[in-house]
Amino acid sequence: MDSAKDDEKEKDFKYTYKEFIEEGQKLCDKTHNLFKFCLNELLNISYIQGNINISKDIILEVDILFSEVYSLPVMYFQIYKNGMPYNFDSYIKENPSVNENIIKSAIISKENHPLTGKVYNFMHLCKFNFLMKSIKIDNILYFWLSLILQIFNFDLMKVIDLKNK
């Protein structure tokens, strides 16, 4: 398919900061006891913060922010193994069942966290806008997070259901 056509289709999908905040609050309400997710604000920027126990010895510390550039959520994260910082590349090498398809469709790099200035792993799903053009989802943030967590073989949809209170 033509790259210009792909770019045009991606522009048709719109996700706003307001939707991010509304869906973020729902996600936090449903997952607070499980992940301690909460909606915070720093420097007039709202973001979702929490920890996810990927396994008995792996914890994923997560900050989800809305990117004005991508008009989508982006995730800053740190991995801890047995309470100590753990390298993302080491995690990937030691876990052969990691979902390579999601990794290939994402930008994963080291970047300074925009709120703390500390170096974090940064993740953005490159083709998410294009994907959202073809499907109808009630809670985009929940769907986005469930895709990202598949990298860590964590099935968010099995853990929580946003439709049921």
Image (tube, rainbow, N blue to C red):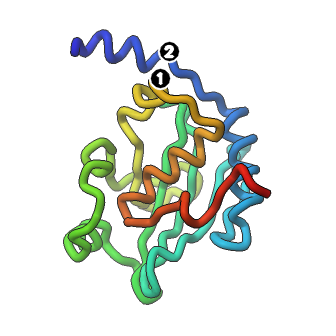
Q: Quadrant of residue 139?
A: top right
Asked whether, in this view, residue 164 is left or right of residue 76, the answer is: right
Residue 68, image x, y percentages: 55, 31
Q: Quadrant of residue 149?
A: bottom left
Residue appearing at x 36%, y 32% in the figure: 127
Q: Residues within 10 Å of mark 1 (few under 14, many from 20)?
A: some
Q: Quadrant of the C terminus?
A: bottom right
Residue appearing at x 58%, y 35% in the figure: 137
Q: Which mark is residue 79?
A: none
Relative height, residue 139 to residue 48 (above, below): above
Measure the alpha-carbon separation of dots 2 and 1. Answer: 7 Å
Kind of residue at badge 1:
Lys
Residue appearing at x 33%, y 44% in the figure: 106
Is label 2 or label 1 in front? 1
Residue 43, image x, y percentages: 70, 47
Asked whether, in this view, residue 72 is left or right of residue 130, the answer is: right
Of residues 1 and 58, the one nearer the viewer is: 1
In primary-sequence order, the first of circles 2 and 1 is 2
Relative height, residue 40 to residue 144 (above, below): below
Residue appearing at x 51%, y 56% in the figure: 117
Reading the image, the residue beneath label 1 is 133
Residue 35, image x, y percentages: 63, 70
Element carrying mark 1: helix
Residue 112, image x, y percentages: 44, 53
Asked whether, in this view, residue 36 is left or right of residue 88, the answer is: right
Reading the image, the residue beneath label 2 is 12
Q: Are marks 2 and 1 in contact (CB under 8 Å)?
A: yes
Q: Quadrant of the N terminus?
A: top left
Q: Quadrant of residue 36?
A: bottom right
